[in-house]
Amino acid sequence: MKFNKDWLNKNWFPYTVAACAGVVLYLLLSNIGPIFKSLGTFIKYFSPVISGLIIAYILSPLVNIYETKVLKGTRRAEVKRSLAVLLSIATVILFIVILMIALIPQIIESITTFVSNLDGYAASLESILTALSIKAEGMHLDISGITAKINEFLSQFAQKLPAVMERLVKMSAGVGNGFLNVILGLILAVYFLSGQARIKHGFERLMKVLISPDKFESMSTFLDKCNNIIIQYIAFDILDGVIVGIVNWIFMIITGMSYSVLISLVVGVTNLAPTFGPILGAIIGTFILVLVNPFHALLFLIFTIILQTIDGYIIKPKLFGESLNVPSVWILVTLVVGGRMFGVAGIMLSIPFAAIFNFVYTDWLVKREKKAIEQDP
């Protein structure tokens, strides 16, 4: 059956379209689980390509720095681009190798020591709980319920530890598979970065054919703004995590706390995730230290609160500046929704998505207000 343009003037046409749209929306929402599962399978098949695009996207600013600053004297554009890509990849690999050489031996030693001394830590904590119970009885306080819950948790933790270690061994195989995808993605990223100009030119030609010049210009401006927001957020978020991790490590070294490298690495990595990440890092660090030295655990918790307060109100505003000025309620909404839909990735990208949404909404609102003023006699 062919579409008849006269239907657009019929009274029943908009109601029919609305009803059909409602049915389609209902079918999509009722089958949201299978849709996301199919999407996950699709992403799994194309994971090396997606990894390559992400790596190329993250390395693109570094490539541009090498191309415009370091190699600006090179005349041939193709040679300059290829050298910039190779230097960028070499810089990142060298940084990762140095970081692994410096951290991995200490992390392995910390984990091995922690696991081997776990029984002693549990016994020490149990004796502390017993002493607290005796003092509480002297003060006519009943904390038996609290101590019983803690002892139950410790016994369950000890029983589940072998199963956890077995899962970690199985996860290492998955990490190996993921590492292979990263290697393939790195190889693809070299090709993406080398042919970035041709890919961008081809995309622009396609868009100019599909949409009008005005819409293309508007879309280009929008994409450039989004790109600046995301690149700035990724760069400064990583820098912020490194700063917090190093400051935490220096504090633990000065105070003589155990597992300084391991805990500082956890704190730095979890700090990359906004809002909930620092809380998770504080919980993990405190739990490890309370088994070794409860006083150190308390000191670490107090320092973490102070450090995260300084980070939230001084370091992050200085790093991110005015360009990511997003209302806190939007960040909270995107954190919850993004975490539910996309897990850790959704949480980590919640702030740039909120910034993009804020930019789009503000731009739309300004245009509507300007149009209303122009139409007002």
Image: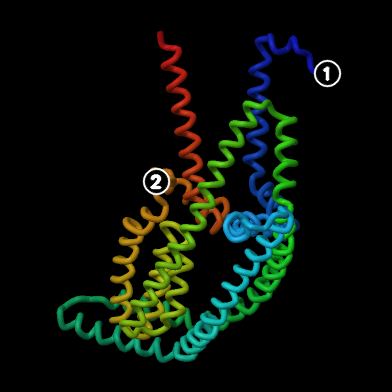
Between the C-alphas of marks 2 and 1, the distance is 53 Å
Is residue 249 toward the left or the right of residue 360 in the image? left
Q: In percent of the image, x 44 and y 27: which residue is there?
A: 366
Q: In percent of the image, x 22 and y 85: which residue is there?
A: 134
Picture quarter containing residue 281? bottom left
Q: Amino acid at mark 2?
A: Glu
Marks 2 and 1, the one that precedes in the sequence: 1
Is residue 128 toward the left or the right of residue 263 in the image? left
Q: Count up the numbered dots.
A: 2
Label 1 crowd (10 A; few <14 / some 14-19 / many >=20): few
Where does the image place residue 376, in percent across and percent down from the top left?
41, 11
Q: Amino acid at mark 1?
A: Lys
Decide: is 32 above or below 71.
above
Closest to the observer, 3 or 213: 213
Is residue 214 toward the left or the right of residue 125 in the image? right
Picture quarter containing residue 242? bottom left
Decide: is 75 above or below 254.
above
Where does the image place residue 222, in percent across and percent down from the top left?
56, 37
Q: In percent of the image, x 66 and y 30: which residue is there?
A: 23
Q: In percent of the image, x 47 and y 79: which residue is there?
A: 157
Quadrant location of the C terminus in the rendered image: top left
Where does the image place residue 236, in percent across and percent down from the top left?
46, 57
Closest to the observer, 265 or 318: 318
Per the image, the residue denoted by label 1 is 2
Decide: is 237 above or below 36.
below
- Give the secondary structure at mark 2: loop
Per the image, the residue denoted by label 2 is 322
- Give the secondary structure at mark 1: loop
Is residue 32 among the parts visible in the rendering? yes
Quadrant location of the N terminus in the rendered image: top right
Is residue 41 among the parts visible in the rendering? no
